[in-house]
Amino acid sequence: MNFIGHQNIFKLQSRFLDLLDTDLIYEDYLINVQKMLYAVKEVFSPNIIEAALYSFQDWNLSYENVISTNKETTLHTIPTIFHGNRIINKINKFSIGSEKVVKNGKMIRLNDRNQKSYFLVLNANFASSDLLTEEDILLKDIAEEFESFLTKLQKMYEVLKEERKYKQLFRATQKLHSSMKMENVLSEVIYTLQDIYPSFTYYLLLSHDNNSHGDLPVKDLEYDSENMAAMKAYVTGDIQFEEMVDENKAITYAPLKGKQGIYGVLQIIAPHTNIFPKNEVEFITAIANVAGGALENAQLYQQSKKLVADLQLINEASHQLNSNLRLTEIMTYMCERISTSFHAKEVGFILFSCESNSIKVLQGSSPFFFEKKALKYIQFFKEIIQVEKDSMFLGDFSIQMDDTEYKSIMAVPMIQTGILKGFAIVMHPDPYYFSFDTFKLLQSLIHHSTLALTNSMLREELEKMVVTDHLTKLYSRSFLDEKIECSLTEDKEGTFILVDIDNFKSINDTYGHQVGDEIIVQVANIIIENIRSSDIGSRWGGEELAIYLPRVPLSIGVSVAERLVSKVRKWTSPTVTISCGVSYWNKETKENYHTIFKRADKALYIAKETGKNKVVVQDSLLC
């Protein structure tokens, strides 16, 4: 090689070193390789017209243009592949742009790197084109310098890439462990990987994940033949590799490990390769472990928040239940609270009757349970709970019963001092809607509410006993007096009926006092069956009974009295009759309770004196 050639080699070395003295090293790797090619072209101009770097693809036996000084440089004729270093091969057809074609291109093989063969391709306009000429030796030296600097450049980029990767890992670690939201953790993992490996594809395969994560590539981790490598990574906790030669891609499965368990698998798909880059495995394992720890922390935080919320719910419910609420108020509160907290569609409280083996839906339950179609659900769970006395948690009720509207069902017995009082039932149309944690919380709520429910029932039963006649179960006279006084103030009108059992003394004399009591009970039951829940039937004294009909005009009150006379005569055994005295008031009459009673009593006296078994209205008006 002549003196000028040596001078140009030194000049080329200087140009290459200049690249290291600038900020170009922080630019894209291929941009700097292209600047190297420009340096070769410019230093050896006009002998070298164009320069390019090619790689040989083993998988499809083709040459691929990595970078060149002309973006339209194309290698048309595939030359023979030479083994060994610095072998120069003449290219018969090498085009630059769409028109210019040269026939004296030179291809110089560089040392293999990253399991790929690279070639420096030059459009070298030298006088001779034979191999091993002085020009060829110069080309070899150019290739040697180019490869030497390319190796240095590549090592620097690898160092910078590693530094950048671990800076990203440090930044991601700080951010991941500063967030307690699952959504933020998952998005940060994907963002970090996409920033470092933009050509890769990622999926987060999470176990027991039922939440929506927007646009994040999150999938459920499922056990099937297509996910064997993923499941192996999840079960063993070791990173797994899958080579898909036919599809020209490699897949890595990195377990997301925390201290207490494995929470999923990170799936990474590397395109255009049959083997996953081994030098990236350590970093991917590190970020997967960081992500697993962050997921664990986020999950534990969410669990602790839920536990606090559950305890607050139980505490609030206990406070409300112990505030002497009425039974209907307790049931309304519990149903609304359960419906809101569990997002339940239907909530019902079913009470058992030990005497008649019947059921009663408590007021406050969802309207659905008062409909006929609810009976099949109530009967199904009633029969099982009465036998097993244990809670039931069904994810899909359609497996147990066909044509069912509600599939997710929880049923919890209400047991107090060992006695089964009834059960609570919570339902939703979707299968597997309720979690097991929700089921355990419901059990705790029902356990706390059962005592309050029982106490409220006993309190209302005691209140009822105070104002109820023990024999007839009608209200007491004092209760009736109180209600009439209130009605005179609040209502516009009302009708009062005084009832007496005819010839009651002869019943006692003939059949005895026990049968006499039974007759009073029979008449009282007929009254209860023929008046509204807002009407008041009471025992006036002895064989005399009284009925007050608030907000009822005289004509309807007389009809009620006549119906009672007819039914008593028909349904009592031994047969008895009754006489009724009816009085009426409205705002215009401005009467008081005493005058209303006196007129009804006078009407009853007339009925008794004029044949009995009849209704007399006020003074002497017969019906």
Image (spheres, grey):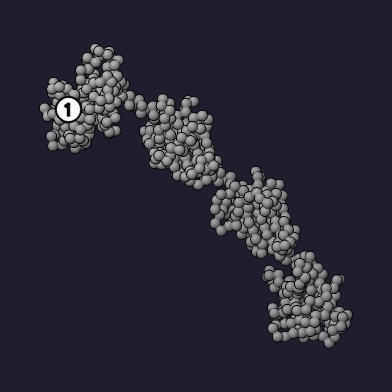
**Residue extending furthest toward the bottom:** 127
Residue occupying image coordinates x 52% and y 36%? 392
Q: Quadrant of residue 91?
A: bottom right
Mark yes or no: residue 601 visible: no
How many C-alpha atoms fall within 10 Å of the one at disc 1: few (<14), some, or many (≥20)? many
Tell me: 520 left or right of 147. left
Q: Is residue 101 above or below residue 401?
A: below
Quadrant including the N terminus: bottom right
Q: Quadrant of residue 537?
A: top left
Tell me: 431 left or right of 603. right
Q: Tell me where residue 388 appears, x and y as whole percent.
A: 53, 30
Instruction: Read off the residue under disc 1.
Output: 615
Q: Tell me where residue 46 appears, x and y as whole percent.
A: 77, 86
Residue occupying image coordinates x 40% and y 39%? 372
Residue occupying image coordinates x 76% and y 81%? 94
Q: Nearer the viewer, residue 118 or 148?
A: 118
Q: Is residue 4 above or below residue 305?
A: below
Residue occupying image coordinates x 24% and y 18%? 542
Mark 1 secondary-structure assignment? strand
Q: Nearer the viewer, residue 222 or 210?
A: 222
Q: Nearer the viewer, residue 538 or 604?
A: 604
Q: Is residue 17 above or below residue 330?
A: below
Quadrant including the C terminus: top left
Query: What amino acid type should be assigned to the residue bearing mark 1?
Result: Val
Q: Quadrant of residue 487?
A: top left
Tell me: 472 left or right of 36. left
Q: Tell me where residue 83 appears, x and y as whole percent.
A: 85, 71
Count of marks overlaid on the render: 1
Q: Tell me where residue 284 appears, x and y as whole percent.
A: 69, 56
Tell me: 477 left or right of 26. left
